[in-house]
Structures are given as structure tokens and as C-alpha cells.
Image: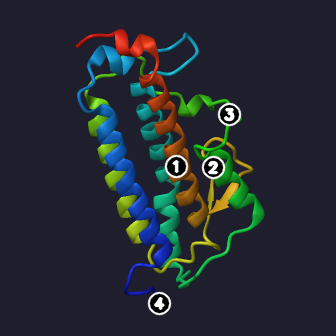
């Protein structure tokens, strides 16, 4: 039977999600459309593309997570935790976090949806984050370790539900840090509103 109170792990994810919302709001506040789309180089992403990439990636993953949660609930796959994830689950989340310096090639299905991004990027990111918050809340009581979700990009990668939440938030921190670096470059600052 699912728990009535929100599990501490899930509350931590919601707290991280709220912090990221604030960071993205701050990134996009008072930024012109030209700045939003400015790229430091031909193969580098703009601030807008960084945020759009998070929406694209997260939405594709939610298309797997939401049915996995519903299936777990219907099959009675409940547990209260705390959950300890295996080494592959922990390693994957670590490789996506902002402190990781190794570059990772983006899978084609995760490439930002456009290069000319407007105000919609903030709205779409907000909608995705609301949906992610709902998924985290609906996972309360579900066995976050035993419920597995297969990667939309790498079919052999089948991680625990809780590990996917952690990896998603780590991935978001990484690209917010990338967007901040873009904003500190001289070319970005030279663009006037």
C-alpha cells in the first residue's frame, strides 16, 4: 500500500526541481531574443537551446516514466524505501551532473527543437517541469528501485525510476551551468536589447 506522506527522496527531488525553476527564471529574465539565440560557435548551443534541450529530453523521458508509474500502481509494486540504487544507476546520474567535465554527445532525439527560439522556451520548460513535478508526486509509494524505465535513446539502458529522477535533475543542473557560461562570454554581453 502506498505511503500517505511524501517520501523524503521524492521531496528532495521536488525541492531540487523548485530550485532549478528559480535558476531558469533568473537565466531568462531580462534576456533579449537575440541573446537567447546567440551561439558562441557553430557547434555550441545558445542559452535558449540549452533550456529547450532540457524540455525535449525530459518530455521524451516522461513518455516512459508516466506509464511505468501507472503500471507499477496497477500491479501493486509499492515500497516505502529508503532506496539504495546499484552502481550503474549512481554512475549514470553522476556523469550528467554539472561537475562532470567530460563532454557527452547528444543523441539526435534530444537535440533542441529549433535554433531560433523565442519566449515559448520558458513556457514550454515550465509546462514540462509541472508535468515532472506531477510524475514525482504520483511516484509516492511506488518502489523507486524495482520499477525500471528504459531510456528513449539507449534501449539497453534500463534504470530504476528513482535513478531517472536523480539523473534528470543532474542533467538539468549541467545545462543550466552551460547556459550560464554562455552568458559570461563577451559576445553575449555585446548584444544589446
- Using the image, tell me which numbered label, if any, was put on residue 61: 1
Badge 1 density bin: few <14, some 14–19, many ≥20, Cα 10 Å: many
Per the image, the residue denoted by label 3 is 104
In the foreground, 72 or 30: 30
Q: Secondary structure at mark 3?
A: loop
Which residue is painted at 56% across and 32% down in the image? 109
Give the Cα separation between the discs numbered 3 and 2: 16 Å
193, above or below 134, in the image: above
Badge 3 density bin: few <14, some 14–19, many ≥20, Cα 10 Å: few
Is residue 120 in view from this perspective?
A: yes
Query: Which label's residue is closer to the chain start, 1 or 3?
Result: 1
Q: Secondary structure at mark 2?
A: loop
Would you say the residues marked 2 and 4 are in contact, meaning their CB atoms lie under 8 Å apart?
Answer: no
Per the image, the residue denoted by label 2 is 151
Tell us which disc is closer to us: 1 or 3: 3
Asked if residue 102 lies left or right of residue 106, the reply is right
Would you say the residues marked 1 and 4 are in contact, meaning their CB atoms lie under 8 Å apart?
Answer: no
Give the Cα separation between the discs numbered 1 and 3: 18 Å
Which residue is painted at 75% across and 59% down in the image? 88
Per the image, the residue denoted by label 4 is 1
Which residue is painted at 69% across and 57% down in the image? 158
Counting from the top left corner in percent of width and height, residue 192 is at 26, 10
Q: Quadrant of residue 164?
A: bottom right
The quarter of the rendered structure image containing the C terminus is: top left
Query: Which label's residue is closer to the chain start, 3 or 4?
Result: 4
Give the Cα separation between the discs numbered 1 and 2: 7 Å
Q: Quadrant of residue 77?
A: bottom right
Which residue is painted at 51% across and 58% down in the image? 65
134, above or below 177, in the image: below
In the foreground, 21 or 60: 21
Counting from the top left corner in percent of width and height, residue 140 is at 44, 76
Badge 4 density bin: few <14, some 14–19, many ≥20, Cα 10 Å: few
Amino acid at each position: 500500500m502506498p505511503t500517505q506522506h511524501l517520501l523524503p527522496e521524492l521531496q528532495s527531488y521536488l525541492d531540487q526541481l523548485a530550485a532549478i525553476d528559480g535558476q531558469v527564471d533568473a537565466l531568462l529574465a531580462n534576456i533579449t531574443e537575440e541573446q537567447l539565440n546567440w551561439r558562441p560557435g557553430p557547434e555550441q548551443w545558445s542559452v535558449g537551446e540549452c533550456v529547450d534541450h532540457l524540455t525535449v529530453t525530459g518530455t521524451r523521458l516522461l513518455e516512459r516514466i508516466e506509464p511505468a508509474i501507472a503500471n507499477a500502481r496497477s500491479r501493486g509494486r509499492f515500497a516505502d524505501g529508503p532506496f539504495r540504487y546499484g552502481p550503474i544507476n549512481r554512475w549514470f546520474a553522476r556523469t550528467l551532473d554539472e561537475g562532470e567535465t567530460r563532454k557527452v554527445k547528444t543523441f539526435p532525439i534530444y537535440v533542441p527543437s529549433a535554433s531560433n527560439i523565442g519566449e515559448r522556451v520558458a513556457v514550454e520548460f515550465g509546462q514540462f517541469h509541472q508535468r515532472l513535478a506531477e510524475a514525482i508526486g504520483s511516484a509516492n509509494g511506488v518502489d523507486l528501485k524495482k520499477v525500471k524505465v528504459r531510456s528513449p535513446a539507449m534501449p539497453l539502458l534500463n534504470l530504476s525510476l528513482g535513478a531517472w529522477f536523480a539523473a534528470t535533475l543532474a542533467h538539468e543542473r549541467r545545462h543550466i551551468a552551460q547556459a550560464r557560461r554562455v552568458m559570461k562570454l563577451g559576445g553575449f554581453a555585446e548584444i544589446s536589447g
